[in-house]
Image (spheres, rainbow, N blue to C red):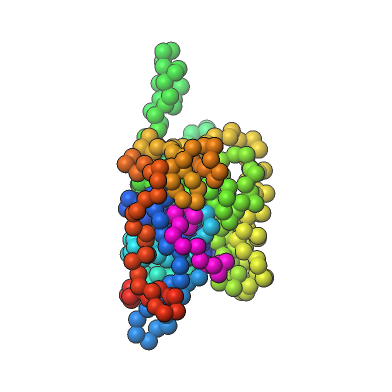
Amino acid sequence: FNRATQAYRQPGSAFKPFVYLAALDEGYSPVTKILDAPLVVDQGPGLPKWKPANYTKRFYGPSIMRLGIEQSRNLMTARLAMQVGMPSIQDYARRFGIDPELPEYLSMSLGAGETTLLQITAAYGMIVNGGHYVKPSIIDRVQDRYGQTIYRHDNRQCQGCQLIDIKADDYHTPPILNDNRIPVTDEASAYQMVSMLEGVVRRGTARSMGEIDFAIAGKTGTTNDNTNGWFIGFTPDLAVGVYVGFDRMKPLGKNETGSTVAVPIFENFIVSAMQDRPQIPFRRPNNINLYTINAKTGIRTSTDEPDSMVEAFKFGQEPLYAASQDDVIGAESNTDNQGELDIPSLY
């Protein structure tokens, strides 16, 4: 029984990046505001109402999208999923190979579906590689006894990689790698998601790794009753997934989350794996601009201000110097006398 390829488990919050990625592809930005407040969803006749909650059992009001990922806010994610639509999120789960048959229930946006460790790790690899489909393979290449490659998993062609093709005056011209892999998301959206997942490590649920001095990003995941703990992360050239759980699906223990059981394993491995590798930054596409913003409000600021950080914006998404009056996702819902939001049926 191969637990990496055959054990189907709920990924919990490790699925959330694909909800946010769908929103980024639709034109939302990392500083789009989403309401973090109580939520009640009517699932239809004969079905109980769904009442998601944050892990902290607290509410934080209108918050920028980045915080929804960094702090793993369930209520923000559920509202964003309602805005984007579960059919779109289902399509992203299929495109990235996470779950080709993900049901269109809103709870799926919080990772209630099932996937394997290999599938979701490969999906994170597609985020960091700029949004190109990658099929996991155990075999990289096969050579015959003469050293000739007769099979290669990576079929991309490189112009100028063969020494015989290099002329004396071409040494300063880098070779060109023709990337014929299928795109699964916009490369600018993929970079924005990479940046947001960096924040998970620097300021969020995986901040115990915040002192690592090379480029690293990822997302924690924990399921109900602390049954499964995850951390899926990556450097610019290496994607790594960690799953912790029992075969018989019993709780790991009180307060045992992806942050406490999976992150330390990931950290131990990645620090060792990166010892002899060059430290390079995440690759930024040309259609991304970087601006300094306030990490809590999303307002443009200077680098010497408290809580300042560098944010990635697509062309046309430049941040403002003052608070925006733009709509807050989820703020249009009606509130009942218990303070809970009464959301119409989605199904």
Which residue ends up furthest to the front in the rendered image? 322
Q: Verify whether residue 225 appears in magenta.
A: no
Residue shown at the point (51%, 42%) measured from the top left: 309
Q: Is residue 5 left or right of residue 20?
A: right
Start and end of the magenta stretch? 54-68
Residue toward you, 24 or 60: 60
Task: Assign the C terminus to one quadrant of the image.
Answer: bottom left
Residue 52 in view of the camera: yes
Residue 163 or residue 314, whichever sits in front? 314
**In this view of the protein, can residue 134 be seen by the observer?**
no
Q: Quadrant of the N terminus?
A: bottom right
Query: Residue 261 is drawn in which quadrant?
Result: bottom right
| Image point (46%, 40%), residue name | 301
Residue 35 placement (x, y as % from top left)? 42, 62
| Left or right side of 192 for 317 | left
Residue for point 35% across, 46% down: 186
Question: In this rendering, would 272 be left or right of 82?
Answer: right
Task: Tell me where residue 178 appears, x and y as whole percent.
Answer: 37, 35
The vertical placement of 166 against 158, above or below, is above
Residue extending furthest toward the top: 168
Q: Position of residue 223 (x, y in %)?
A: 55, 68
Is 35 rendered above or below residue 40?
Answer: above
- Number of marks in picture: 0
Q: Is residue 245 left or right of residue 49?
A: right
User: Percent from the top left, x then y, of residue 89?
Assistant: 37, 61
Q: In this orientation, which residue lies closer to the viewer: 153 or 11? A: 11
At x 41%, y 21%, the residue is 173
